[in-house]
Image (cartoon, rainbow, N blue to C red):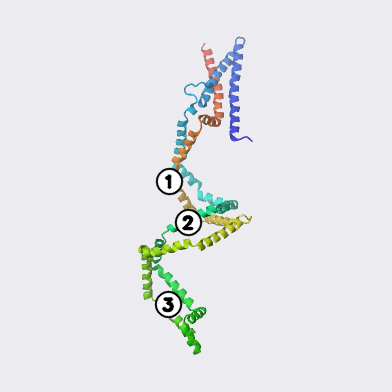
Amino acid sequence: MLSRAELKDRQLRHMKWWASGLLLLVFALYVLSSSFETRYPSLFYLAAFTEAAMVGAIADWFAVVALFHHPLGLRLPHTAVIPRNKRRIAEGISGFIEQNFLAEEAIVARIAQYRPARKLCAWLLRPDNADTVASYAARLLAYGMTVLDDARIRRFLLDLISKKARELDVAAGAAEVLDVLTQNGRHHELFDQALASLDELLSRPETRRLIAAEIAKNVPFLKAVSDVLRLDLDEKAALRLLEVAMAKVGEVRRDQDHELRRRFDAFVAGFVQRLKADEATRAKVHALRDEVLANPALGRYLEGLWGDFRAWLAADLHQPESAVRRRITQVVGSFARKLDEDAQVQQWLDEQILAAAPALVREHRAGIGRFIEDQIHGWEERRLALELERELGPDLQYIRINGTLVGGLAGLAIATITQLAR
């Protein structure tokens, strides 16, 4: 099967043969008509036609060839026009494309006419396309797993993450988080939740038994007295402690201005301030960060988790019925259906694309123009002439054919008028 360039070359040769064959035909007719004109006077008109046709054909042949080459190898002025003006042509083409094809108004209008959100939605609603997206995503994941399986890459990423983690100002970050949490008394909601959880925990029978056991273990005197007197002093003490604790918790939960709440506020505020300004506190936090990062057990644990996940994902992606691929397909389909049902979101997407398009066009238009110009500059003059002649040559051969016919008709008309004038 011939390539596009080969087909173009064959078409060009075919048209050249037609134009040149017509020139040879009128030349042969001219020779014959001139030779027998004295015997057959009416051949005068054929001789006039063919003579003028040859002149027109040769003139147009010269014009067409001069666009791309030096006719007959003669370096006459204003021949090989295209190769000799490569720079000007490159600048002209790039400028024309930049100003007309890459104009902001034209691109925005075309995008608005295209309705990209609607087109995207319709495309994603087709099951085959959702499967295609999932397939590409799965292949990308599989490739990523292969890349990350290399020990050099893992070591590089681990060193990079560790380095960046050591540079993090954890104390300042924690202070900012706590600032946000404590604005407008938000932290009291967490405090109330913690108190409610503690209240519920202390009311459980298993909690009572645990506290009783701990008291008996850590207060041996009380346990000994309880055994001698055969009294459940340890259990009673535990119950009493629980009652006191539960009463205190209930008191704090009911009283929004309780002393413990004020102490809690003061502690949080002081801790946030120390995280921001106290170098000793900040140093402790950062030392804890470095200690965690330097712990080999953490590295082994994370590496084990990553290995298990990678092995599972790799095994799943190689299965015909991959759960990951199926899930991605479901997500794509769900997104498409939601988008199809919500015209306002489609309109919003189109508006965002149309709003972003002019800036993108302005940013990249000149670069695209320069790229086209550089590509043409990079071509050899001979290649430029070859490519343009390949594309335009077949049509330009019609100029030669038309020049032959028009020239002949013009010559015939002039000869007729001359005869009539005599």
- The residue under label 1 is 359
Q: Is residue 356 left or right of residue 411?
A: left
Q: Secondary structure at mark 3?
A: helix
Residue ID at (56%, 18%): 54
Identify the element where label 2 is drawn. Answer: helix
Is any atom of residue 353 visible in this view? yes
Residue 249, numbered label: 3
Q: Residue at x 53, y 31 (%)?
A: 383
Question: Which-is-in-front pick, marks 2 and 3?
Answer: 2
| Secondary structure of the residue carrying numbered label 1 | helix
Above-or-below relation of 172 to 356: below
Nearest the viewer among 19 and 245 is 245
User: Looking at the image, do the residues carrying marks 1 and 3 touch, with CB atoms under 8 Å apart?
Assistant: no
Q: Is residue 304 above or below residue 230?
A: above
Could you say where residue 198 lies in the image, as x and y percent from the top left? Answer: 46, 75
Residue 180 seen from this side: no
Instruction: Kindly identify the amino acid type of the residue bearing the numbered disc 2.
Output: Ile
Amino acid of disc 1: Ala
Viewer-proximal residue among 266 and 94: 266
Viewer-side residue, 306 vs 366: 306
| Residue 324 x/y as whole percent | 58, 57
Q: Residues within 10 Å of mark 3 (few under 14, many from 20)?
A: some
